[in-house]
Image (cartoon, grey):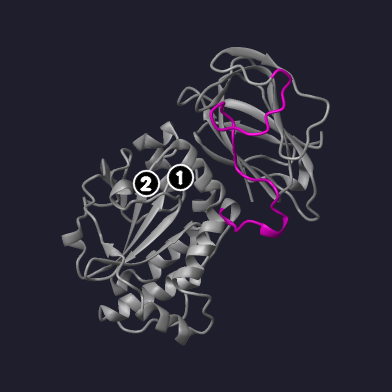
Amino acid sequence: MSDEANHNSRRFLLIAAMCLAVAGLGMIGSEGQHMGAAAQLPVEGTLPSLEGATGWLNSQPLTPSSLRGHVVLIDIWTYTCINWLRTLPYIRAWAEKYKSQGLIVIGVHTPEFPFEKDVDNIRRAAAAMRVTYPIAIDSDYGVWSALHNQYWPALYIVDAQGRIRHHHFGEGEYEMSERVIQQLLLEAGAGRSQGLASVDARGIEVAADWDNLMSGENYVNYEKTEDFASPGGVVPDKSHVYTVPPELRLNHWAVLGDWTMGKVALTLNKPKGRIAYRFHARDLHLVMGPATKGASVRFRVSIDGHPPGAAHGSDVDADGNGNLNEQRTYQLIRQPAPISDRTFEIEFLDPGAQAFAFTFG
């Protein structure tokens, strides 16, 4: 799959997920109807070999034969993906609730950005996010390709005979997925489950405010970015001093200072560099990190020229101060209602910051 296809897949993830859910199972309301739909699920294929994994965390290597007799949930993820982060509370809850009944959850970590191939980064992220179930490290896209997958996140639910019985791409349809798990466990002899798992979503894992979400994911590299507004445009792969126009239109962005815009990342060469973005959403996130692993870069954010105050995200204080010390997704803004067009700025006080993509919620 091409990088451009990946980009488009992430951008239209919700639409694809809704269409597939409606086409495959319909919009079913009652518990009995859910169970009936699950019982009629087609066989979509068999669980392929997991030999494409380059390593494992939280488990010895697992194989389709060793998983026979268990209902298996395969969760395709990468730790910076905001769409996956918002599904994680459900995955964790299902792993805990149904573990004693024979459900095995396997998180297949397939990276989007180069730094997500770093096993130490994956291990740290998994610990921070309380991902305790087995993780197949899929840095070479071996498992992804074996499943013919195209999306982050993606769920594949496998019955006790090793047959794929259901899939879901993107966020949402959580009750349907859980009813499928329950039905397949019942088929495997685990007994009928009562109710649904209790889900506790906090911080960056809280569902998006879809009614107010008018800004979409945007990469900050010359290959995939959209609506870059610094005068003169992009100077690829070279140190260049950029400026910010007096005003930004909605969903346009610009940079100020000495930056190098590469094929994958935007890198700050000298202190006091800024990124400005005009957006409309409750939440604003930025995938970023220090260019040198282990380094630390101080930053400060503002909204409409002022400290964020009550609109600050979990990775900054009310004055907008934060510290860039890991390569991950940072939540910089979570604004209270009413939501309107706002201008976000982040200033890096030290050189060596790298930014990869903006996401919103």
**In the picture, which quadrant includes the N terminus?**
top left
* Amino acid carrying mark 2 in the image: His
The disc, 1 or 2, on the residue closer to the chain's N-terminal end is 1
Name the residue beneath numbered marker 2: 109
- Whether 275 is drawn above or below 128: the answer is above
| Residue at disc 1, secondary structure | loop
Q: Which residues are magenta?
A: 205-232
| Side (left or right) of 133 relative to 128 | left
Front residue of 314/162: it is 162
Name the residue beneath numbered marker 1: 79
The crowd level at tag 1 (other Cα within 10 Å; few <14, some 14-19, many 20+) is many
Q: Is residue 276 visible?
A: no
**Residue 125 placed where, x, y %?**
44, 44
- For the point 62% across and 27% down, the residue is 298
- Whether 102 is drawn above or below 234: the answer is below
**Label 1 close to label 2 by CB (< 8 Å):** yes
- SS assignment for the magenta stretch, majority: loop
| Residue at disc 2, secondary structure | strand
**Residue 36 placed where, x, y %?**
41, 84
- For the point 28% across and 50% down, the residue is 146
- Whether 84 is drawn above or below 89: the answer is above
**Residue 269 placed where, x, y %?**
59, 15
The crowd level at tag 2 (other Cα within 10 Å; few <14, some 14-19, many 20+) is many
Distance from label 1 to label 2 (Cα)?
8 Å
